[in-house]
Image (tube, helix red, strand yellow):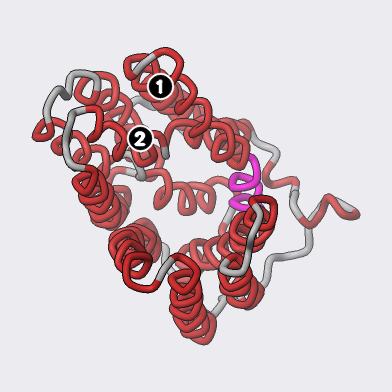
Amino acid sequence: MAIGTVLAPIGLVLASFTTQIWQLYLTRGLMFGLGGSCAFASCVTLPSQWFYKNRGLATGIAVAGGGIGGVIFSSLTRYLITELGYRNALRVIALICFGALCLATGLLRSRWRPPPSTSQGFLGVFWDRSMATSSFAFCLVFSVIVTFSYMGPFFLAPSYVLHLSEDAQLGSVLLSIMCGMNAISRVFLGFVSDRLGKCNTLFICTLVAGLLVTLIWQYSNGYGSFTVFCVLYGLTGGGWVSLLPPLIAQIVGVKHIQRGLSLCYFVSVFGNLSGPPIIGHLQTSYGWTAAIQFTGAVTLVSSLIMLIVRFTMQQKVIAYV
């Protein structure tokens, strides 16, 4: 967490002085990305250490900040760029991030250190034999696939608003709405998962998100219907963000959650990096139907992978998993 507190703000400050695109990749991309990852990964694993009965709700509240931050920073960044220019805007945001991360670092408390790994050498940092299960293996597959499609609607929402011949400002409004709904859903789905089971809830919300993309977004021919889609997708699409940490804790054990979740986040890099460019290429080369249906199909495949995880954990059709 302390590493992220230093690295992320410095990345933003250095980005404000860049004059070439490769410098922006190193600062805003690499440095800020690594810093943000260190901070986020440190936060999402802690609720599972301190809570058992309401573990899903606690994790949902913790990660809801990501959705709230999306609402605040989307509008704040636009205002700062207009008033101060993009260079000063980056510096102001860096200062805000540094203050918030310093506060978080001071408040965080780990219940215990990860136990020594049963694997030897460098591999032991990331792997333990408790993770050698089919359930965890399919969770890794899920982490790769779901990230290919998750950010698609967020990236394409502003462009789709222009496609509907609406004001570009409305695209930013819808983006804020999706982030706000995402924050609400993380808390709500966490609460539901404590009653229905983490795996059951994650399967249902991912399935619903895929159906929303395939059926509602595809036929959203006006701003009103697209707004409905953005609200509903915001409520379901990001369920995996809050539900994956407690699910991993359930599969590999709370004491190994750092290793298990870190590995899931590591493999998700492939989807995070490749998904939006692929969807964007499909949209520009083949039209909106190709981009939308690809996003929906990948999300539906993700839900099927989570269904496999569910039955590797418990073969009974009706069970708390």
Image coordinates for residue 20, horizontal then vertical, percent:
66, 54
Query: Crowding at label 2, few (<14), some or many (≥20) Cα neighbours within 10 Å?
Result: some
Q: Secondary structure at mark 2?
A: helix
Asked whether, in this view, residue 126 is left or right of residue 191, the answer is right
Residue 30 is inside the magenta segment: no
Circles 1 and 2 in contact, beta carbons < 8 Å: yes
Image coordinates for residue 293, horizontal then vertical, percent:
36, 17
Q: Residue furthest right?
A: 121
Q: Which residue is mark 2?
A: 156
Answer yes or no: is residue 315 visible: no
* Viewer-nearest residue: 244 or 4: 4
For residue 11, which quarter of the picture?
bottom right
Mark 1 or mark 2, which has the lower sequence index? 2
Task: Give the residue drawn at x 83%, y 50%.
Answer: 123
Up-down relation of residue 154 to residue 120 (above or below): above
Q: Which residue is mark 1?
A: 283
Task: Give the residue drawn at x 60%, y 63%.
Answer: 32
User: The residue under label 1 is which amino acid type?
Assistant: Gln
Q: What is the distance, in whole Å, between disc 1 and disc 2 at their CAs? A: 9 Å
Up-down relation of residue 286 to residue 175 (above or below): above
Image coordinates for residue 241, horizontal then vertical, percent:
43, 49
For residue 197, which quarter of the picture?
top left
Quadrant (top left, top right, bottom left, bottom right) of the C terminus? top left
Quadrant (top left, top right, bottom left, bottom right) of the N terminus? bottom right
Task: Give the residue drawn at x 62%, y 36%.
Answer: 270
User: The residue under label 2 is which amino acid type?
Assistant: Leu
Q: Which residues are magenta?
A: 259-267
Q: How many marks?
A: 2
* Viewer-nearest residue: 321 or 182: 182
Tell me the tag on residue 227: none
Look at the magenta stretch and give its main secondary structure.
Answer: helix
Task: Give the residue drawn at x 60%, y 65%.
Answer: 15
